[in-house]
Amino acid sequence: MNITSSNAQILLSVPDLFPTPQQLQQFAADDIYGTEPVQAGETMMGVDGHLTAGFTFVPTVQRYALMADSPSHYFFDQIYAQEKAQQTKFPINGVILLVAVGTKFTMTRGFLSTYQPLPDAKKVLQPRTHSITWERVLPSPS
């Protein structure tokens, strides 16, 4: 089975700023994106030893890593600049196509939650990372 991530496609849009989806380009060498595990529910043990559980909605935090010279930083730079200027948040929508495993992930109603304004400078400029907190992430066959 092929599990390469080199052919992953990530498209993000911001209806008020970038209504046409923007494809992210020039991912970091060893890192494209990462997501934090989500709490799948709440459990509670009663004093009688009976365990109960309930479903709760939780957001998904996704971090993107882009090479220092990636033109896709403009997308994140503009979102942050406009949010700062207008003192508001802009909702983001996205799609990830993982060609290797035939899966599409649709992300809805996300918000820029972390933004790295400039790259760290070492021997060479390091990747910049930004994160979006999503309301929903839904997988489906592509």
Image: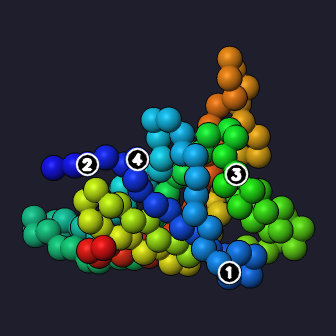
- The reply to whether residue 26 is visible in this rendering is yes
Which residue does the image show at 62% across and 40% down from the upper left? 67
- Check residue 3 in the rendering and tell me which mark sits there, or answer none: 2
* Above or below for 123 versus 59: above
Q: Which numbered disc flags the more N-terminal residue, 3 or 2?
A: 2
- Alpha carbon of mark 4 to alpha carbon of mark 1: how far? 26 Å
Q: Which numbered disc flags the more N-terminal residue, 1 or 2?
A: 2
Q: Residues within 10 Å of mark 1 (few under 14, many from 20)?
A: few
Location of the C terminus (image quadrant): bottom left
Secondary structure category for the residue under label 4: loop
Q: Camera-side residue: 123 or 108?
A: 123
Q: Residues within 10 Å of mark 4 (few under 14, many from 20)?
A: few
- Label 4 amino acid? Ser
- Alpha carbon of mark 1 to alpha carbon of mark 3: how far? 18 Å
- Alpha carbon of mark 1 to alpha carbon of mark 2: how far? 31 Å
- Label 3 amino acid? Pro
In front of the other: label 4 or label 1?
A: 4
Instruction: Name the spot of residue 71 as percent of width and height, x first.
Output: 70, 51
- Residue denoted by label 1: 19
Instruction: Name the spot of residue 47 as percent of width and height, x first.
Output: 16, 66
- Label 1 amino acid? Pro
Q: Are marks 4 and 1 in contact (CB under 8 Å)?
A: no
- Residue denoted by label 4: 6
- Alpha carbon of mark 3 to alpha carbon of mark 2: how far? 26 Å
Name which quarter of the figure residue 109 lies in: bottom right
Secondary structure category for the residue under label 3: loop
- Residue denoted by label 3: 71
Q: Residue farthest to the right?
A: 85
- Alpha carbon of mark 4 to alpha carbon of mark 2: how far? 9 Å
